[in-house]
Amino acid sequence: TQAGVLLPTSQEKPKVRIQPFAAYTYKNFDALKKASSQFDIGSNFFLDGHHAKLTAQYSSRPVYTAPDNIDTYLGEFTVQLQIYL
């Protein structure tokens, strides 16, 4: 499941638009006996329309110590830059 909203929502073309988002993923792999739930939250920053996009995202990922045991969840922070020339 993913959800996000693009701000500002006016019809004007601002130089910077922000798109906060959140996601939830449920994974149940055959190789692992225990399913996991994963969460993501972040924001896209659109610069000059869609000519450049900066994304910052935090994700929660499970740490399996055995196929049937999730020991803990660790955070993962990702930053991406996309430029359209």
Image (cartoon, rainbow, N blue to C red):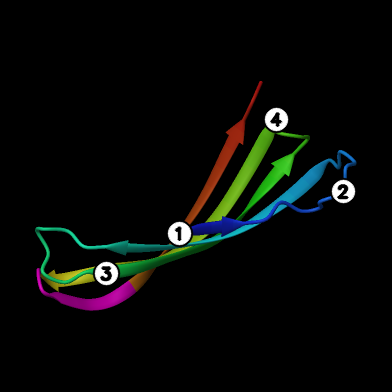
Question: What residue do we see at 70% from left, 30% from top?
Answer: 51
- Marks 1/4: CA–CA distance: 27 Å
Of the image marks 2 and 3, the number of the one nearer the N terminus? 2
Question: What residue do we see at 10% from left, 74% from top?
Answer: 68
Q: Which residue is mark 3?
A: 36
Q: Residues within 10 Å of mark 4 (few under 14, many from 20)?
A: few
Q: Which residue is mark 1?
A: 1
Residue 36 image offset from top left, x and y in percent: 27, 69
Could you say which disc has been placed on residue 51 in the image? 4
The residue segment tinted magenta is: 67-73
- Marks 2/3: CA–CA distance: 39 Å
Please identify, in this view, whether the residue under mark 1 or under mark 4 is nearer the observer.
1
Q: Secondary structure at mark 1?
A: loop
Of the image marks 1 and 3, the number of the one nearer the N terminus? 1
Q: Are marks 1 and 3 in contact (CB under 8 Å)?
A: no
Residue 30 image offset from top left, x and y in percent: 11, 58
Viewer-side residue, 27 vs 65: 27
- Marks 2/4: CA–CA distance: 19 Å
Could you say which disc has been placed on residue 73 in the image? none
Q: Secondary structure at mark 2?
A: loop
Examine the rendered structure and indicate whether residue 51 appears above or below residue 28.
above
Q: Residues within 10 Å of mark 3 (few under 14, many from 20)?
A: some
Of the image marks 1 and 2, the number of the one nearer the N terminus? 1
The residue sitting at the top extreme is: 85
Examine the rendered structure and indicate whether residue 71 appears above or below residue 3.
below
- Marks 4/3: CA–CA distance: 36 Å
Q: Are marks 2 and 4 in contact (CB under 8 Å)?
A: no
